[in-house]
Amino acid sequence: MDADVRDPEHLLALFSEADTVIHLAARPGVRSSFDDPGAYVGLNVWGTAAVLEACRRAGVSRVVTASSSSVYGETVPAPFAEDARDLRPTSPYARSKLAAERVCQRHAARDGLQIAVLRFFSVYGPRQRPDQAIMRFTHQLVGGGALERYGDGRAERDYTHVDDVVQGILRAVQWTACAAPGCEIFNIGSGRPVALEEVIALIGRAGGAKPRIAARPEQWGDVRRTHADISKARAILGYEPRVSIEDGIARFVTWYEDTYGFEPRATA
């Protein structure tokens, strides 16, 4: 059933028989957030507040919710740790996710909730959004077109396969069953930053084609590097990433070809 995450009565009915809520609803996208920042505040901040208020009314104390590595911005030294100070998000999207974290902290303190906030790092895998880099590059490669690369290719991301994200979510759900009331933040990443040019090479290798690059200027709001310190998630949740970027991209390209029926074509 489709509904607005800010609809309190719908949420209350949905949560009436739940013991744990996994809140992943959000408006995503760094670049698009500059066009309509108010929509990001409405859905990501007020939407989170509505979910937590519905949890209080329904008597649900265990919550796992999604945040983003983008909250760290450019000023935090790598690897990014959850207790880093002076966070300076560089986009309306990132600021809305940081504000949503603050909402979680207030509700946990006020209502006695056990909340796990998971900061996801560059999630990729089957069925990811078409505007995300790995999906977009794969589509361009198998179609024989040039890959539109923003920046010089040396920007690094801590890419996290969706299987590892699911593992992190399930372990966080287990943690809420025994945690004291409060709000804890956990990084869910691979712990290994990878340059964009390496990602492109891996996609080309998996697709059996030589990537042709169409260079584009860097985009406003993009950061140069993300790198997750996952020691807290390891120690408390028992989280351990299992899918390497090499294996993950190979699996993704295979899924893409099986799903869309394209055959890769070599490009000059």
Image (cartoon, rainbow, N blue to C red):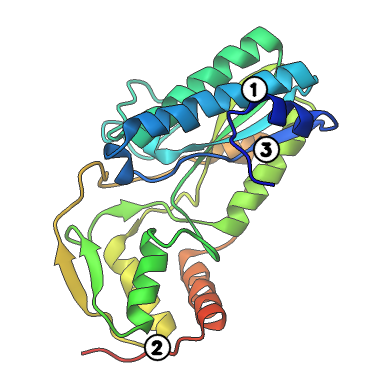
Q: Residue furthest top?
A: 110
Residue 191 x %, y % = 46, 49
- Is 124 left, or right, of 217 in this rendering? right
Instruction: Name the foreground residue: 254 vs 36.
Output: 36
Quarter of the image where one finds residue 259:
bottom right
Sequence order check, earlier mark of 1 and 2: 1
Quarter of the image where one finds residue 127:
bottom right
The numbered disc on residue 22 is 3
- Is 196 left, or right, of 46 in this rendering? left
Residue 246 x %, y % = 46, 70
Residue linked to disc 1: 52
Q: Secondary structure at mark 2?
A: loop
Residue type pointed to by label 2: Pro
Residue linked to disc 2: 264
Pointer 1: residues within 10 angstroms few (<14), some, or many (20+)? many
Above or below residue 75? Residue 59 is: above
- Is 90 left, or right, of 65 in this rendering? left
- Residue drawn at (60%, 54%), measured in percent from left and top? 164
Q: Secondary structure at mark 3?
A: strand
Pointer 3: residues within 10 angstroms few (<14), some, or many (20+)? some
Instruction: Name the foreground residue: 51 vs 165.
Output: 51
Sequence order check, earlier mark of 3 and 1: 3
Residue 235 x %, y % = 63, 36
Instruction: Name the foreground residue: 112 vs 231.
Output: 112
